[in-house]
Image (tube, coloured by chain):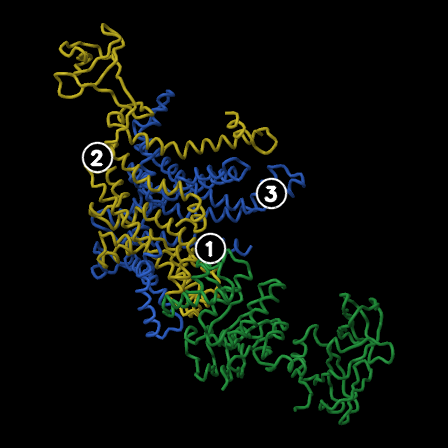
Amino acid sequence: MLMILEPIMRVIEVPMKFLQTALRLKNPAWLFLFPNLVLFGLFAFLPILVNVAYALTGSDGILLSDRPYVGMQNFTDLMACESYLDPNSCKDDLFWRAVWNTVWFTTLQVGLMVGFALITALILNRDIRARGFFRAVFFFPVLLSPVVVALIWKWILQREGILNAWLDGLGLETFNWLLDRDWAFGWSVFLSIWAHMGFYTLILLAGLQAIPRDVYEAAMMDRASPWRAFRRITLPLLMPTMLVVLVLATIKGVQTFEEVYAFTGGGPGSATTLIIQYVYETGFAGAPRLFGPAAAASLLLAFVLVVLTVIQLWLNRKNVDG
Amino acid sequence: MSHLVLKNVKKAYGELEVIKGVNMEIEQGDFCVFVGPSGCGKSTLLRMISGLESITDGTISIGGAVVNDVPAADRGLAMVFQSYALYPHMSVRQNLTFGLENMRTSKAEIKTKVAKVSKMLQIEELLDRKPKALSGGQRQRVAIGRAVVREPAVFLFDEPLSNLDAELRVEMRREIAKLHHDLQNTMIYVTHDQVEAMTMADKIAVLRLGQVEQFGRPLDIYNHPNNIFVAGFIGSPRMNFVAGRAGEVSASDIEFITDNGERIAFHTSDFDVPANAKVTIGFRPNHLSVSQDKPDFKVKVHGTEQLGGESFIYAKTLKDEAITVHLGGQTDITLGTEVGVTIHRTHLQIFDTETGKSLRRRA
Amino acid sequence: MAKVMSFLTRTRGNGKLHWTDWLTYGYLLLGVLLMFLPVIWLGLSSFKTDAELERFPPRILPMAQETVEVEGYDDPLPLYQITGGDYAGRTLAQIRRIGLNAQMVDPTNPTERLNVNIDDRQAVEHFALATENYSELFARFNFLKFFWNSVFITSVATIIMLTVNAMAAFALSKYQFKGRMVVLGLVIGTLMIPQTVVLVPLFLITKELNMADSLWGVIIPGAATPTGVFLLRQYMLTIPDEILDAARMDKASEWKIFWRIIVPLSAPAIAVLAILAIMWRWNDFLWPLIVLTSTDNFTLQLALNSFQGELNTQWSNLLAMTMLVLLPIACVFVFLQKYIATGIASTGGK
């Protein structure tokens, strides 16, 4: 591999040397940073600025020159509600449905997922046989693509799928799962937990394994019961990891889109439309393409994410120092 | 003409000056050792010579040409690093040839050079191993080999032996000395270990706080240290110091009064001591003897080391100055006793207590 | 067998299973079923014929009815075991079904037509993999094109990302220069703003750069990941500076130091990042969904998603395609599971 690239690297060496002398650089750090900074600039920083510009302009033009300045209009349109609790009373009811769906989705998904991840991590941390295998089993779905995850479960849940066959065999009622608002939402949450739980299990397991064994041995010498040892040693020592996992899961949770979109397409109706899907459909899928509201909505989401990330970095720092 | 000349060389990181104007001339073929406590700037100075560190002020010239702005690679130097800095992913052979390849040496030439060097350093069998598979001593050899193979004008060694155990260190010391003898190159060697400095150097530069305290032949420095710091740093166990003041002084005699009031008379004309000046006298542990009969001063013993063939007595003057006595043979002096000691009059140092400078008359 | 039993029951050193151990293994077993069975079910189903897929309740293994060539009939006829009525016990081939009766023929006596009540017959079946589900993908769908698109995007994006990120990480870990902290701060800043919230302007910029609906539009914008820079920088910080100094004394240029010293020495971290990058790119969905509009440019993920929405797509082909998309990742998983796990844990996901 390295051998193949060797001639290429020799060729690059010439301009790199030349630039370093020509630009009279004491060290070539900026030369090495240059390609990365160009990509960052174009595809990370610039978009943030342009996003603000889009949010403050109207019409369905894609070029900023075609877009008249409308001030906070896009935001006030999004926020125009008689009651925020009732999407029907809002000017942009889909946005508010998506917001509430996302809130519920994230709450349920994060709560259940972190709970199960904790249980799984605790069990994997026990003195069990073939731990590597079991860890891999729970981690496996993390690697699957969202579309594949969605199709796997769609196939199981379809009208004449294996789940219905099984329920039928037991003499229970069968459903058209994905055509029922509540079931579709519930299964979306389940699917998302199924796909991502392994990742958080892994982090929590690492946290558990970082707790020194001798602390437990000391507790055993102190005649602490297993339950007490769990409550007074494991939980407090695992708390920093738990908090990081919670925030991280929330950050990812509010951005959920891909697997749910491929699973239900946001339906039935808008029962499983989440906020990123709103952005996608408003900005890209529909005609006309309403970039203004899409940009405004994503700015609101960005605000939430920045707050969450700051919390996370702060927690991480405390973790590292402590 | 000197081979390597440093003229008022300075290095500053912002406000912080770490090398405060160093002047030095190193002759062609000299083995020069920079020695000093950690943080004295000896490694920085070496790296400035090598070109790895920029020079804030002054000039460095090699063979008559100023090299301030010449990049490290083009100064015709080679360096052996403290951690050896072997390329871990390359075999010993590749480690040796990497530099030669970069200098576009022909393949045939590389081959002969590697063969010669690996024979000289007895690393022929190791050529296809990776550094990971080598012992500390072998790595050291390879690191030296990597420097030798490039046939540099000047060798730079940055504390090369500090990662070896005591026995290997002695062995490698001898090998490096032999290498110098064979190659007759200029070598600059940095160490914090004054034993290495004494045993290997043609010239020693004692550094402290970014300045050269003394630069000269090892025994000159040992016998005639410029100041208290050099006197204390060179020689092991370190020199004893007793503070006091000069009493009556004549052209051939000096009377010294310790802070404790003991009066010691010296018959010497080597020093230029003003009467009543505050001075500190220094004398090495082997220039002392224990005597109950008319001792120079008394010390309290708080430790002894009996090595069989020789003994060390660790004591304190009544003013709490540490005194080490080196005795040939064995001793029956025990802990806690008070003994008198006498200084051998021929090996004496006198320093100005305020400035630390030696009061030896300039020749 | 005894070995297996003792393996399964051995725990906690005292030879007896505590009730918590039962709970533990119960939970783990449930986990294995929940995590693997859906995938296995998908795999089994992908080998079933369309007729079999429509069967309710479904059967576990893919089965196909046996057929027989009968003289005087163009197509092979399905075979049935007759369980009742006049011809009970015989094996007959069915010509056609008329209402509640089936018109059948005995393969050994093709001239005589027999009428059988449909309740009296049972299909003769055998285990058969409907591999045509897979072969059709190549014939009827542009599968190879999608596959190529995915492979191209994955490999090129991974190479670009590794090169660019390793260069930046080298600069940020091994050089002291003014503005280093600012750059590091900016990198952290990009961690905070994920791609999902700048979709609209990102699309505009990509379009302005003439990369909309092109594979490069998927490759380039994702190349400078802050995660990659961080992961590599952390690793490169552990490479001693003296090795770089030694290389400088050996007359190596800075680029050569990067290429011949830093890159080989960072190989473990680069490998982890490479695996992650390959996975991210292969599974990427949202950004390709936005950038790529013409079907010819679709990646496997997009193709899979769009086919599941089309009416004329059969489950049989869809399932087979899903399996093919899943397979590379599953292989990678089997061999590199440990590295992926540690890699993902150390970078905190994406």
What colour has chain B? green
Q: Residues within 10 Å of mark 1 (few under 14, many from 20)?
A: some
User: Hey, what amino acid is under mark 3?
Assistant: Arg
The chain ID associated with circle 2 is C
- In three-dimensional space, the C-alpha distance between marks 3 and 1, rounded to whole angstroms, equals 26 Å
The vertical placement of B263 against A102, above or below, is below
B215 left or right of A58 in image? right
User: Hey, what amino acid is under mark 2?
Assistant: Glu
Question: Do dots 2 and 3 share one subunit?
Answer: no
The chain ID associated with circle 3 is A
| Residues under numbered marks 2 and 3 in contact, where contact means CB atoms less than 8 Å apart | no
User: Which of the 4 quarters of the picture holds residue C9?
Assistant: top right
- In three-dimensional space, the C-alpha distance between marks 1 and 2, rounded to whole angstroms, equals 51 Å
B44 left or right of C105 in image? right
What is the letter of the yellow chain?
Answer: C
**Extreme-top residue of the structure:** C86
Q: Give SS at disc 1.
A: helix
Question: A147 or B154, which lies in front?
Answer: B154
User: Hey, what amino acid is under mark 1?
Assistant: Leu
What colour has chain A? blue
Question: Do dots 1 and 2 share one subunit?
Answer: no
* Location of mark 3 (residue): A232
A209 left or right of C225 in image? right
Q: Residue at x 79, y 85 (%)?
A: B257
Point out which mark residue A313 bears: 1
The chain ID associated with circle 1 is A
First in sequence: mark 3 or mark 1? 3
The vertical placement of B284 against C11, above or below, is below
* Location of mark 2 (residue): C136
